[in-house]
C-alpha cells in the first residue's frame, strides 16, 4: 500500500502566513521532507496524491520557495532547466511567480524536447 493523503497531512503544520504545509517529519540533507521508511520525498508524494503522476523527467518546483512545503497548490511539475531557472530567479528576486505564469513561460514545457 502506498502513501495516503492522511499520512501527508498528519506530518504537516500549516504556516499561517504563506499557507505552506510544512513537513514535520525527517528532512534530507537538502532540506526536503523524507517519507517514513525512505518511501520517497514528501513533496513528490504529495504532488502525486493530489495532482496525479509526475511526468517523466519532471522535477517538482516549490512555487512558495519553501523546500519543506508539501501543499499541492504550491507544487508544479517542470523540466530540470525550468526548475533551475526559477530557483535562480526567485533567489535573486528577478521575477514573481505570477509574472512567470502570465508570461506563459511554464505552460507546455514539461515533456517537450529542446529544439537543439
Image (cartoon, helix red, strand yellow):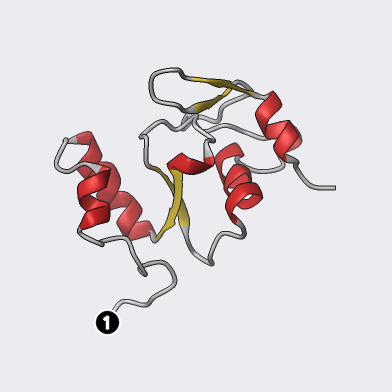
Asked which quadrant contains residue 111, the reply is: bottom left
| Residue for badge 1 | 115
Residue found at the very far bottom of the displayed protein: 115
Binning the other alpha carbons within 10 Å of mark 1 as few (below 14), some (14 to 19) or many (20 upward) gives: few
Taking the spot 47% from the left edge, 60% from the top edge, the residue there is 58
Q: Residue at x 58, y 53 (%)?
A: 51
Question: Helix or strand or loop: what does disc 1 sit on?
Answer: loop
Q: Is residue 111 left or right of residue 104?
A: right
Pick out the residue farthest to the left: 94
Judge whether 113 appears above or below 64 on screen.
below
In the picture, measured across the screen, residue 75 lies left or right of residue 94, that is: right
Q: Residue at x 52, y 36 (%)?
A: 71
- As drawn, the residue found furthest toward the right would be 1
Q: Number of marks in the image?
A: 1
Q: Can you tell which quarter of the image residue 28 is in?
A: top right
Looking at this view, is 33 or 71 the one in front?
A: 71
In the rendered image, the quadrant that contains the C terminus is bottom left
Position of residue 38 measured from the top left corner of the image (x, y, whole percent): 70, 38
Q: Is residue 105 left or right of residue 50?
A: left
Residue located at (61% from left, 43% from top):
46
Rendered location of residue 2, percent (x, y): 79, 47
- The x and y percentages for residue 27 are 56, 27
Instruction: Give the quarter of the image for residue 104.
Output: bottom left
In this view, 56 is above or below 69: below
> 73 or 86: which is nearer to us?
73
Amino acid at each position: 500500500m502506498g502513501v495516503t493523503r492522511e499520512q501527508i497531512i498528519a506530518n504537516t503544520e500549516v504556516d499561517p502566513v504563506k499557507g505552506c504545509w510544512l513537513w514535520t517529519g525527517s528532512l534530507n540533507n537538502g532540506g526536503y521532507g523524507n517519507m517514513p521508511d525512505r518511501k520517497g520525498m514528501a513533496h513528490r508524494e504529495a504532488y502525486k496524491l493530489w495532482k496525479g503522476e509526475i511526468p517523466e523527467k519532471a522535477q517538482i518546483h516549490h512555487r512558495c520557495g519553501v523546500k519543506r512545503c508539501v501543499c499541492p497548490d504550491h507544487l508544479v511539475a517542470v523540466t530540470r532547466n525550468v526548475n533551475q531557472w526559477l530557483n535562480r530567479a526567485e533567489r535573486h528576486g528577478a521575477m514573481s511567480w505570477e509574472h512567470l505564469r502570465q508570461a506563459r513561460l511554464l505552460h507546455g514545457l514539461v515533456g517537450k524536447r529542446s529544439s537543439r
